Amino acid sequence: MAQYDVIIIGGGPGGYNAAIRAGQLGLKVACVEKRMTLGGTCLNVGCMPSKALLHASELYAAANTDFAKLGIEVTPRLNLPQMMAQKADSVVALTKGIEFLFKKNKADWIKGSGKIVGAGKVEVTAEDGSTTILEARNIVIATGSEPSSLPGVTVDQLRIVDSTGALTLPEVPGHLVVIGAGIIGLELGSVWRRLGAKVTVVEYLDRITPGMDAEVAKTFQRVLTKQGIAFKLGSKVTGAKTTRKGVSLTCEPVAGGAPETIDADYVLLAIGRRPYTDGLGLESVGIQTDRRGFIPTDHFKTTAPGIWATGDVILGPMLAHKAEEDAVACIELIAGKYAHVDYNLVPSVVYTAPEVAWVGKTEEQLKEEGRAYKTGKFPFSANSRAKINHETDGFVKVLADATTDEVLGVHMIGPQVGEMIGEYCVAMAFRAASEDIARTCHPHPTRSEALRQAAMGVEGWTMQA
Amino acid sequence: MADIMTPALGESVTEATVARWAKKAGDAVRKDEILVELETDKVSLEVASPSDGVLSEIAAEEGVTVGPGALLGKITEGAVTAAPKVAAAAKVEPAKPAPAAKAEPILAPSAQRIATENNLTPASISGTGKDGRVTKGDALAALEARAKAPPAAPIVAAPRAIHEREERVKMTRLRQTIARRLKEAQNAAAMLTTFNEVDMSAVMAVRSQYKDVFEKRHGVKLGFMSFFVKAVVHALKQVPEVNAEIDGTDIIFKNHYDISVAVGTEKGLVTPVVRDADLMSLAGVEKEIGALGKKARDGQLALEDLQGGTFTISNGGVYGSLMSTPILNAPQSGILGMHKIQDRAMVVGGQVVIRPMMYLALSYDHRVVDGQGAVTFLVHVKEAIEDPQRLLLDV
């Protein structure tokens, strides 16, 4: 029986980063992963493959619609199998990268599914059914999440797919119906829209992307609509009937009214994710999940001694980079160091085109808190680089405390803004004032100038709009 | 055991310096015997023993600054004849080690701007940012705190080395106060001085004529000061803004005439107040000035003797000054400078005659008093002195 300092159950962004950090700190660490590859949902069936398709489909769409006005005349032809193959290649390369990092940091990768069978004991069931018991002073649960289900809509991964299935459709749907106007649904909807599908998004709420600043969400919806995505808001899906050739989806207005049937070639169910703790043996150590399935923690400590939890199985935004923050902090706490994660500083990015990115508080949250704030806004239509690149949709909005000028939230929609939000994450971690950004030189011509101009706007001295 | 406490120091006086202990720890003392002398901004005061006993402890050594209610020392009560107990070691605060040199705080760009523009010392701003960095909010808070707090004491330069033929003497608290208040008056007021001259013949004639009978009747010598006090009150009534003070954006006019009279003492100049001078006879004024002057020279002035004057008269003439520009006694708006009486050749009615003349100076706060008012005031004083019957008739 092997004795570890730390055993991590789950090899996703939370798990593998925990393993690497534990290795760095000289802890004897193992990571139990039931997939045949490391990287979890993110690398295998989530962030990474979706970005591969978003990137490829964006270029395809650009070749179709934008190249001509740049003076490039082409008639692109879609080779979907090749697009899928390059995606798979990238994913394989990335998962191999993590294997390398495990070796480099002396973290053991245990293949099989892990189950807690008592304090300090993890039973690993290998693919062939054989079991091993591992022992550790600390166990970190990093089992992540899975797509939520919807009564009446059964995912068969053929005609009715979840986010995993939507990454491997065998053809471009004639009509794809996306249930849920959240980030995953809109990203994957965008992919298939660009490749030629008619896309309809059905959403229960009367707005898209809950949690996103409302002003940004409004602009975002307008831009997506312009790209050909149809929205059916305030609409409740009541059932889905699969036929050989497609799906017949029934829905009705939430506010009441006549039900309606939508015929689709494929349906993507993307209404959110739920913590994944099935078969984990939580009961063996007395851990009870909350009503929604999350494991309650206090600074990553569960109610059971020596058992910790991070990432999507605990409260907080269900994002890979949040899981990574949790993982590092959790391992550092195990190693007796100081660690703290400020969830207010976990940024969110939607990888559509234009992208949406934000960090900190939305205007709605600030209003609810009754906090006095000032706003600075700058449109990309006034940014020289965005204008040159014909990518003028969107804006940057900076929210700062009315008294101290401390930046409280930043909301952006525009070309590749996801690459720029980190600037404000650093600034906010240092409790910067909007003026600090406004007084920091930004390169010209770049889109990042919009961040500075918006910051200037907080105190009313935006110079270029 | 009885505590010796610092007594109430008077209106707007918040601290005193322990000037001198009359007794040592271990000395036997009697009730009401003077134990210790305190100096405040305005006066010296003595603290007497609350009971018979032994001064068992001195808590505030000479030179220490104390506030009202602060412990000065302790008396072990008992018969004086009792063998003095061994004095408890005086409680002296051990010198605090100088704080370890703190690294200059790191300021956010915005905080740097605020600190530089407002002359905030970075080290004085407490940073709440990551690792103690100073955020804009911190700088703004420091700025606001400074605005609310009284102005910081000017940074005192390190004492310079003195030459062997120089002598360094600590300024008394009174001297420090005089220095500070004079400078404050200069900084606050728009101060300027107007001059006139007065023929003293008439007053001198009255004086020589009634000198003896006046002294016999009132028990006090008839001097010039009483004439000037009355002349000033007369003039203040004509030009009330000279008897006013600025308070924020308001002007407070005073309908009482309390004249501060500068008196030189060996410790420095003090300005006791002749109250309600408008209601006094010349004899009353002379008596009051005499009494206050004696108190001042004996160091017996109480705080209330010094407070509340509405106008000041300063007489540099007693030391021989021919002309001067006195500095205001804040928050008052006017001060009259009297000078030496000197026989000068004057032209009167087309004839050159010898007259005992005195130059008069009025320094005034131009924020309150216009030039016309100042000149008019001085002319009224001049006329009253040259023709004292005007005082009698109030014209």
Image: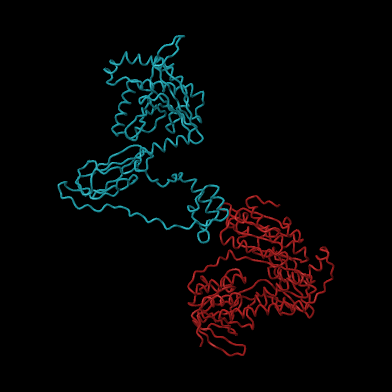
Chain colours: A red, B cyan
Residue B270 percent location from the top left of the image: 36, 32
In front: A278, or A393? Answer: A393
Asked if residue A8 is positioned above or below residue B194 in the image, the reply reads: below
In the rendered structure, the answer to whether residue A9 lies left or right of residue A54 reads left
In the rendered structure, the answer to whether residue B78 lies left or right of residue A118 reads left
Q: Can residue A371 be seen in the rendering of this structure?
A: no
Residue B210 percent location from the top left of the image: 31, 14
Q: Can residue B63 be seen in the rendering of this structure?
A: yes
Which of the 4 image quarters holds residue A177?
A: bottom right
Q: Residue at x 54, y 54 (%)?
A: B137
Asked if residue A48 is positioned above or below residue B6 in the image, the reply reads: below
In front: B223, or B72? Answer: B223
Which of the 4 image quarters holds residue B232?
A: top left
Residue A97 percent location from the top left of the image: 64, 78
Q: Residue at x 34, y 23 (%)?
A: B285
**Residue placed furthest toward the top:** B350
Residue B211 percent location from the top left of the image: 30, 16
In the rendered structure, the answer to whether residue B361 lies left or right of residue A331 reads left
